[in-house]
Image (cartoon, rainbow, N blue to C red):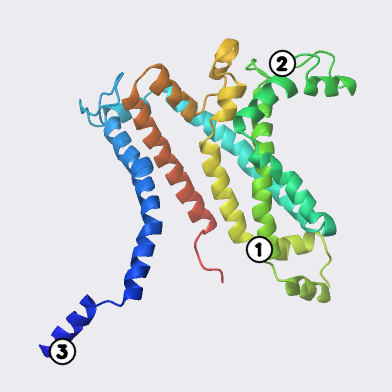
Amino acid sequence: MAVTTTIKARRRRRPPGDRAATLAFWAFVSPALIGLTVFTLVPIVWGFLLSLSHAQNTIHVGHFIGLRNYADLLTDEEFLRSLLTILIFALFIVPLTFAVSLGLALLVNRAGRGTAFFRTVFFIPSAVSYVVASLIWRVSLFNGTPFGFANHVLGSLGLIHQPIVWIGTPSPPWYWLVLVTARLWLQVGFYMIIFIAGLQEIPRSLYEAAAVDGASPGWTMLRYITLPQLRATSISVLLLNLIAAFQAFDEFYNILGGTGSSVGNAALARPPLVYLYSVALSQQDFGRGSAGGFILTALIFAVTLIQGRLFGFGESEK
């Protein structure tokens, strides 16, 4: 009993240094916790309650209808078509971004003195607003007139005789080229930096040993040394890229036309976020909009989990 009492007394009498460290810890952590609770956790809980309610023209939780909003969306042809749209977009942009960013990383990493310059040049588009880039793509580069940049270049080379209507025609679907190139230009520099970081972690001794064994530089070392050593980095890039693709909104909304005279083009390719934006804000059906957001979140989580399992993400390398 005496020993227990002594231990409890020591625990109650903490040194002043421990108290100061505890106060400092909570002083630094509390703002982040408060912000996380107010701006993230509370909206998530509130949105989930809205998804279970008939929230037409209101954001107040009240008339609970269970999973009816989820059932309505999963049988909604337009919502299912939007899911197909984002799958097609992901099939284009994910492998293309992976290949281009890896290729740029390999070239920039071997640039010698110009490495810092090229890293900066290729990374700058990542800091550009998606809205601004989308408008430039629609108004200047692919505006469909003879004086648009793409039509002017192709016409000067003699490849076309009539200007191509890049946006607005379902066949041929040139709008996919506009959407994919806009996203590619915006994000390829970010993933290039990730690949460069992975390349710089590969020991030079591996390349030297391979050269001693007679391996020729180029494809052989890329296949048997560089790519295996970049396995974790490659999986991370694929996962991040896939999640970003499923969250596409700005380029679709601004290039195909969310407002103005070109609003009709939105039907050509409408991803889930654009469709749910229309449901929640145009139709004022916040219940169905919230339900769609959680369906999309579950889909992203499932696809990411499956992809991680297929590529062995998180497994120890042998």
x then y, percent, for residue 147 = 81, 16
Q: Amino acid at mark 2?
A: Val
The residue lying at 57 percent from left, 54 percent from top is 236
The residue lying at 57 percent from left, 37 percent from top is 90
Q: Secondary structure at mark 1?
A: helix
**CB under 8 Å between discs 3 and 1:** no
Quadrant for the C terminus in the image: bottom right
Q: Pointer 2: what residue?
A: 165
The residue lying at 38 percent from left, 51 percent from top is 31
Q: Nearer the viewer, mark 1 or mark 2?
A: 2
Q: Amino acid at mark 3?
A: Val
Q: Is residue 80 left or right of residue 189?
A: left
The residue lying at 62 percent from left, 34 percent from top is 129
Of residue 315 and residue 20, the one placed in the foreground of this image is 20
Q: Amino acid at mark 1?
A: Pro
Q: Secondary structure at mark 2?
A: loop
Q: Residue 22's image quarter?
A: bottom left
**Residue at the left extreme of this rendering:** 1
**CB under 8 Å between discs 2 and 3:** no
Q: Pointer 3: what residue?
A: 3
x then y, percent, for residue 29 = 39, 57
